[in-house]
Image (tube, grey):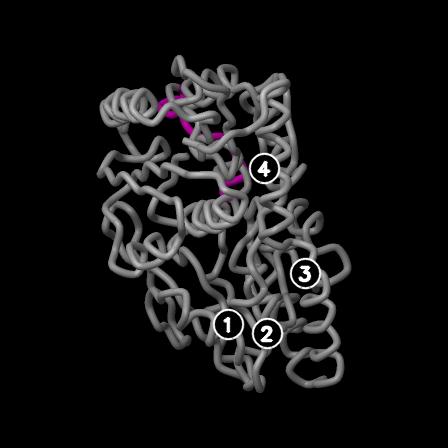
C-alpha cells in the first residue's frame, strides 16, 4: 500500500491497515512526501502486521515531480518483488501504470483537475497536461478504481476516464477514538488550513461578527513554504490525534465551508464527537452527510455568518444537529470500510482467496 505523510491519506491508510490486520492481513506501507514525524511513527508501531518503508519522494501533484515519480516506481517494484503481495493498493495514481506482479487497486482521494475547477472555476494551465496524462495512464493500468464518494468517482471519470471497473467505498474511522464531552462555546475547523479547497479564510473573515471564538487546528504552511494568514481566530497549529480528538470533544460547532472535499475525514471525526456541522454546499458533502448537516454556498459569507449565529443563539437546535451528525457518522465505521476493501480485494483475486499480505 502507498500513502503520503502530508494529509488525510495517512490517517486513512493507518485506519485501513489496522482493520486489515484484525483479519490477519499483513500490510507493507510505502510512504511519500517526507519522513514520518514522531507521532506518525508511534501510531504505525501500534498496528500489528504493519511494516512501513519511508521515502522523501515528491508527490505527483507537486511541481516537477517526475524524476521522483520514476525513482519511486523503481523502489515500489523492488518492494513488491521482495514482499510478493497478493494485492497492490495505490493511494496515488501514476504508479498504476507499472507492471505489477499482483492485481492493482488505485484509490481516487482527490486530484488536481477537480480541485482546480472547484477552487478557481477553471482548469489548470497547459503545464499540468503531463500530470493529467500520468494520472490517466495510472487509472487505465489499474484493475480496479475506488473512490470514497460517487461524486469523486464521477470527477475522475470526467477528467481521466473511461474507467473499466469501479467501486465506491466510503472512508471510515473508529468511533472509540472520538467522544463528545461537555460542549463549550467554540467553533472549530481543522486540517490542511493552507488548502484553498478547505476554504477556511471566510470563517476567519467573519469571526469578529460571531459571539463565539473560532479555533483553527492544522498546518498553515503550504508545500512551497509560504504561510497562510488567518486573522481574528485562535490558531493552534498542527496537532496529534489525541489532542485533536479532545478539541472535537469540546467544540460545539464544526465549520468547513469547503469548495472541494471529496470525503472529509476531519468532518467525520468532528461528527463522531457530536459537533453540529456547517459545511460547504457541494455534491460530495451532500452525498456523505445528507440531512445531518447544514450547508452554505462556499462563496456566501453572509449565509455562513447567519447559519453559525443561528446555531449559537439556539442551543436546542444546535444540540439536535450534533445528535444528527453523530448518528450519521456511525455508518462510516472503520469496520465497514475494511469490509468494503476486503470485498474488493477478494473480487480481484477470485477464484483465489486472500491469503496473508497486502502491498
| Contact? badges 2 and 4 (CB < 8 Å) | no
Return the x and y of residue 311 as percentages of the image width and height. Answer: 68, 78
Q: CA distance from mark 2 to mark 4?
A: 32 Å
Q: Quadrant of the N terminus?
A: top left
With 102 as the anchor, is 301 left or right in this view? right
Q: Nearer the viewer, residue 184 or 314?
A: 184
Circle 4 sits on which residue? Answer: 341
Against 179, residue 224 (above or below) is above
Return the x and y of residue 238 as percentages of the image width and height. Answer: 34, 64
With 38 as the anchor, is 193 left or right in this view? right
Q: CA distance from mark 2 to mark 3?
A: 18 Å
| Contact? badges 3 and 4 (CB < 8 Å) | no
> Over which residues does the magenta segment extend?
119-129
| N-terminal label among 2 and 4 | 2
Circle 1 sits on which residue? Answer: 188
State which quadrant residue 147 falls in.
Answer: top right
Circle 2 sits on which residue? Answer: 253
| Contact? badges 1 and 2 (CB < 8 Å) | yes
What residue lies at 57% left-to-right and 23% top-to-bottom?
144
What residue lies at 50% left-to-right and 46% top-to-bottom?
16
Tell me, yes or no, whether the highlighted magenta stretch contains residue 211: no
Label 1 secondary element: strand
Return the x and y of residue 246 as percentages of the image width and height. Answer: 46, 76
Amino acid at each position: 500500500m502507498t500513502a503520503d505523510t502530508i494529509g488525510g491519506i495517512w490517517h486513512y491508510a493507518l485506519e485501513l491497515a489496522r482493520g486489515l490486520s484484525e483479519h490477519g492481513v499483513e500490510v507493507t506501507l510505502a510512504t511519500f512526501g517526507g519522513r514520518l514525524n514522531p507521532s506518525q511513527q508511534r501510531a504505525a508501531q501500534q498496528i500489528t502486521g504493519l511494516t512501513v518503508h519511508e521515502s522523501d519522494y515528491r508527490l505527483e501533484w507537486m511541481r516537477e515531480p517526475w524524476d521522483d515519480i520514476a525513482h519511486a516506481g523503481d523502489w515500489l517494484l523492488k518492494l513488491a518483488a521482495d514482499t510478493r503481495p497478493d494485492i497492490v493498493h495505490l493511494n496515488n495514481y501514476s504508479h498504476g501504470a507499472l507492471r505489477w506482479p499482483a492485481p492493482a487497486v488505485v484509490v481516487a482521494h482527490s486530484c488536481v483537475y477537480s480541485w482546480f475547477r472547484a477552487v478557481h472555476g477553471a482548469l489548470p494551465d497547459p503545464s499540468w497536461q503531463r500530470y493529467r496524462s500520468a494520472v490517466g495512464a495510472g487509472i487505465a493500468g489499474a484493475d480496479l478504481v475506488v473512490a470514497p464518494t460517487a461524486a469523486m468517482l464521477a470527477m475522475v471519470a470526467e477528467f481521466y476516464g473511461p474507467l473499466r471497473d469501479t467501486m465506491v467505498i466510503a472512508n471510515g474511522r473508529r468511533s472509540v477514538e472520538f467522544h463528545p464531552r461537555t460542549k463549550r462555546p467554540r467553533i472549530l475547523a481543522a486540517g490542511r488550513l493552507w488548502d484553498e479547497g478547505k476554504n477556511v479564510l471566510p470563517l476567519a473573515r467573519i469571526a469578529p461578527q460571531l459571539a463565539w471564538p473560532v479555533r483553527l487546528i492544522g498546518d498553515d504552511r503550504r508545500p512551497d513554504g509560504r504561510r497562510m494568514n488567518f486573522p481574528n481566530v485562535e490558531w493552534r497549529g498542527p496537532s496529534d490525534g489525541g489532542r485533536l480528538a479532545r478539541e472535537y470533544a469540546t467544540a460545539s460547532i464544526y465549520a468547513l465551508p469547503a469548495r472541494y472535499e471529496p470525503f472529509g475525514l476531519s468532518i467525520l471525526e468532528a461528527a463522531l464527537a457530536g459537533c453540529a456541522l456547517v459545511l460547504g454546499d457541494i455534491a460530495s458533502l451532500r452525498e456523505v452527510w445528507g440531512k445531518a448537516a447544514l450547508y452554505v454556498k462556499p462563496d456566501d459569507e453572509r449565509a455562513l455568518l447567519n447559519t453559525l449565529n443561528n446555531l449559537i443563539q439556539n442551543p436546542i437546535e444546535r444540540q439536535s444537529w450534533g445528535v444528527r451528525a453523530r448518528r450519521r457518522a456511525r455508518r462510516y465505521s472503520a469496520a465497514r470500510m475494511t469490509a468494503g476493501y476486503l470485498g474488493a480485494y477478494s473480487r480481484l483475486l477470485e477464484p483465489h482467496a486472500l491469503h496473508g499480505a497486502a502491498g
